[in-house]
Amino acid sequence: MSRPGPLRGPAFRRLWIAGFVSEIGDWVLLVALPVHVYQRTGSTAATATTFVVALLPSLALSPVAGVLADRFDRRKLMLVVSLAQAVTLLPLLTGDLVLVNVVTAVQAGLAALFEPAKNALLPTLVPREQVPAANGLVALNANLARLVGASLGGLLLGYTGLTGVVLADVASFLLAAALLATLRTSDQRRGAGAPAWRAWLDGLRELRGPLRPMVAVVGLMATGQGLFVVLFVVFVTERLGGGAAEVGLLRGVQAVGGLLGGLLIGVLARRLTPDRLLGASLLGFAAIAALGWNGPHLTTALVFYLAVFAVVGVPGVVAGAGMMSVLQLHTSDDVRGRVMATFGSLYDGGQALGMVLAGALMPVFGLSALLNAQAALYLAAGVLAPAVLRGRRAAPAARP
């Protein structure tokens, strides 16, 4: 008889649905807003600025987000943030382009407060052996929301303009808030404690324990992802002779593999510990990436790369869920929010580093060398990942 999965628990089920609804709204806006800006301005620089301002708040607010997630009731914090996200979208209805970047930055800042609280709360809602499967379902959400929300964003912008896009996103946040309002947890945080700066430093000290190897693992993963974001477009256009349609198609098909990966995690997690799940998926990702990057020596047929980039979505999602599970299960509940926020900031910084390196090193080493270096970063992370649990014991995942 199969064991009940995480969705059998009403608390996690509400969190899962709330996250799904909210992410659909995020993708609706993420796809539609840059298109709207470009249609109004005709400026590539203005469009790029919309993306850049979405990255900075996460780095700036990481210390605050972690302390808040550990100091206050996480469910209530997420509820307040969801309501704030709905309200702060409304200025976009004025149509003023000056407000676009302001609203984008505010939304990114609120999301930076939401994510550590969600990731810190999740292990307290399911038995610890179900944490990897729960993270797999969250990853499944992200890919399904990407498919639904991206398509919906384009349709709404075309048929209703920015007004319909904004109202759809507002509705998604309000629905998520309603679900969070009915979520019941045993969290009893009341906000007392050391000054915020000292609390943040206390959280950083956690990185000197069992999670120390994860700093290198996450840094390698993030740098590799940053390289990918820049080099992927160059690879498709220069090596495969594709254009914008091919770039979009090959990026989108990764979500199909991501859906399969999210469904497989529950099965894999019963056979592998989270650190081995992470290591195996990173090694698989490196092997498939190396195959794809060197594939043009054999063929440039689009169907081959559709298959490669669909398949690579599987270990990509499994690696993300494995990483999250290792961080959650090897951190005590009292500091988990700060640890999750710190690693989130580390990942964003690593991505930025990878993007900068891609631009700076392309003229020096060429595309092929950097593509293979990207696969090598994932290979190194996969080899290092199992060291996280070697000779160490996991921290308790949840309060009684």
Image (cartoon, helix red, strand yellow):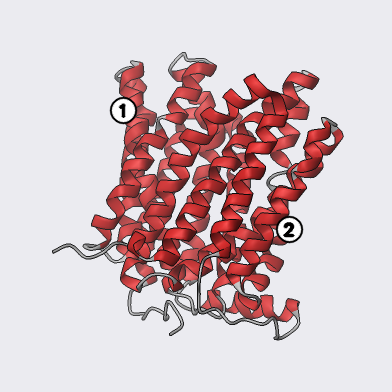
Residue at the disc numbered 2: 60
The residue under label 1 is which amino acid type? Ala
Q: Position of residue 359 (x, y in %)?
A: 63, 34
Q: Position of residue 392 (x, y in %)?
A: 36, 80
Q: Is residue 222 in sight in this rendering? A: yes
Left or right of residue 369, residue 27 in this image: right
Q: Name the residue rendered at 71%, 67% in the picture.
A: 64
The residue under label 2 is which amino acid type? Ala
- Which SS class for mark 2? helix
Left or right of residue 101, residue 317 in this image: left
Residue at the disc numbered 1: 307
Q: How many marks?
A: 2
Of the numbered discs 2 and 1, the one sitting upstream in the chain is 2
The answer to which of 78 and 310 lies nearer the viewer is 78
Few, some or many residues within 10 Å of mark 1 (<14, 14–19, 20+): some
Q: Name the residue rendered at 44%, 41% in the picture.
A: 143
Q: Name the residue rendered at 58%, 82% in the picture.
A: 188
Q: Name the residue rendered at 37%, 32% in the picture.
A: 309
